[in-house]
Amino acid sequence: MALHAACSLPSTISIQKEGKISASLKETTLTGFSFYNHLRADNISTLLTIKRRQNPRFSTGIRAQTVTATPPANEASPEKKKTQRKGTAVITGASSGLGLATAKALADTGKWHVVMACRNFLKAEKAARSVGMSKEDYTVMHLDLASLESVKQFVDSFRRTERPLDVLVCNAAVYQPTAKEPSFTAEGFELSVGTNHLGHFLLSRLLLDDLKQSDYPSKRMIIVGSITGNTNTLAGNVPPKANLGDLRGLASGLNGQNSSMIDGGEFDGAKAYKDSKVCNMLTMQELHRRYHEETGVTFASLYPGCIATTGLFREHIPLFRLLFPPFQKYITKGYVSEEEAGKRLAQVVSDPSLGKSGVYWSWNNNSSSFENQLSKEASDAEKAKKLWEVSEKLVGLA
Ligand code: LMG
Ligand code: NDP
Ligand code: PMR
């Protein structure tokens, strides 16, 4: 089978195992590969497009790419690091999966206080305890991203705590692969895009001021993206594919009157999720373009790997939930554990070598980070601008 053959390519894997082998070697090795092999290469973390091969920036090693990322000013000095106060990171959807694992990874360093921004207060509190987080390392605060009112209330309550905001992680998401009909947020937007994109869009815009005011040496805003929103990958080519079209559905309110899909098409829950991830990745880049220079905040997105065991798949059919983890583990080899994925996201939160803004991070099978290439649509600056303007109207910022 094409997939199987591509997935078990020993050349790809053996290169990955050589931790320090450069991307150029990998690229040269993979240059002659077929379409499927290219796609497979992305799954194990790099997709090599023609554009990328022609770009001299990518002829340096993977490590060089991360090392050359601009380190935050103060982190170069060990003395300053010692006296640096604990950072405060707000993580949305920290009650399970990636968010919880990241909260745990950050709390374990002793350098972070995590604000777990969750829709289910009790679940979050239990989850924090179940992974062994100590009381002084976290605060649970209520946030329901499916309600813009709740987003505003969260921002108010957070400000009342008088904690500084050093890092914001927009992580929460819903996925409705089996829904036949759309459901809607409190304000009447289709639920997946309403929660994953619009809720986070308002939250990030409101909290930008708070990030600006922080005196932390490396202030960051991270929006979790995914491979399935990127059509330059095999995963992104599994139907239904992400496609925002000309945003006509979003512009008309995404409320089911005209359409509940961004492109104006028929409702499809899996597509709505993938579209929402494209929005997340476009928003990160637009934030970077508009605010990085002015504020010094680092904006980043990432694909943490396929965390096939999380609650994200709770609405999928039982057979899928049974087969998906072994499929990812043994066939695509894209699987990562929640713990590993949490460590990856925690690196994007605090690692000095991942301080570059405007980047979509991914990891190799040997867990080295690298700057990945987004699909044409997910890096379309015109679309990002349009999405920004339409989203501003929908959430009441314009
Ligand atoms: C859509 O269908 C639905 O239409 C939509 O409503 C929504 O639910 C959406 O993304 C969610 O899915 C997608 C559908 C079409 O995909 C499937 O139905 C496949 C589900 C399979 C999920 C993975 C489980 C596979 C289990 C394999 C066995 C594991 C065993 C364990 C391992 C042990 C090993 C030692 O998908 C497609 O149309 C596919 C098109 C994909 C394009 C890429 C083509 C690649 C070649 C395909 C080969 C597939 C081989 C793999 C597995 C076979 C599955 C039985
Ligand atoms: P989970 O379902 O385990 O976690 C999602 C979190 O989002 C949960 O804490 C959930 O809360 C929360 N959430 C859902 N809706 C809302 C809402 N309205 N308000 C506030 N919080 C909400 O999934 P994952 O950990 O897998 O997903 C985390 C992120 O990782 C997502 O952005 C996803 O797109 C991304 N991702 C996941 C991949 C994977 O393979 N799993 C791959 C690539 C990216 P509750 O606990 O109450 O349900
Ligand atoms: Mg995918 C080749 C690599 C690869 C990777 C890394 C993923 C990740 N997937 C891959 C391939 C395939 N998937 C193939 C060949 C198929 C057809 C058999 C396939 C199917 C599939 C389904 C039905 N995959 C899925 C689904 C889902 O319902 C998940 C989804 O799309 O959610 C939106 C999913 C995922 N695959 C991934 C990842 C990371 C997901 C989880 C969702 C996400 O992007 O967050």
Image: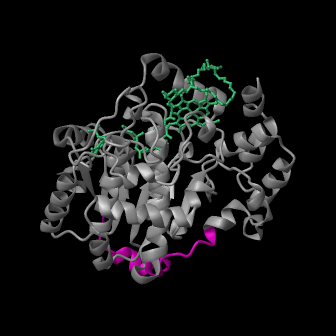
Residue 219 sits in quarter = bottom left
Measured as percent of width and height from the top left, residue 234 is found at 66, 39
Q: Nearer the viewer, residue 305 or 13?
A: 305
Q: Start and end of the magenta stretch?
A: 67-88
User: Is residue 111 found left or right of 266 in the rendered image?
Assistant: left
Verify whether residue 390 appears in magenta: no
Residue 87 among magenta residues: yes
Give the position of the C terminus as an image quadrant.
Answer: bottom left
* Residue nearer the viewer, 197 or 370: 197
Q: Is residue 34 above or below residue 137?
A: above
The residue that appears at 42% across and 35% down in the rendered structure is 267
Quadrant the N terminus occupies: top right
Residue 397, x across and y down, in percent: 27, 67
Q: Residue furthest front?
A: 258
From the top left corner, tell me how far across and down residue 89 is, in percent. 31, 61
> How many numbered discs?
0
- The image's colour scheme reads one colour
Ligand 2 quarter of the rendering:
top left
Side of 71 where 23 appears, left or right: right
Look at 72% across and 45% down and name the residue there.
Answer: 17
**Residue 396, placed above or below residue 3:** below
Tell me if residue 290 can be seen. yes
* Relative depth, front residue between 131 and 342: 342
Question: Which residue occupies 34% across, 50% down?
Answer: 103
Q: Residue furthest right?
A: 32
Q: Quadrant of residue 58?
A: bottom right
Image spot of residue 285 (x, y percent): 50, 66
**In the image, is 47 to the left or to the right of 284?**
right
Say whether residue 108 is visible.
no
Locate residue 13 relative to residue 274 in the image: left or right: right
Q: Hey, which quadrant is residue 218 in on the image?
A: bottom left
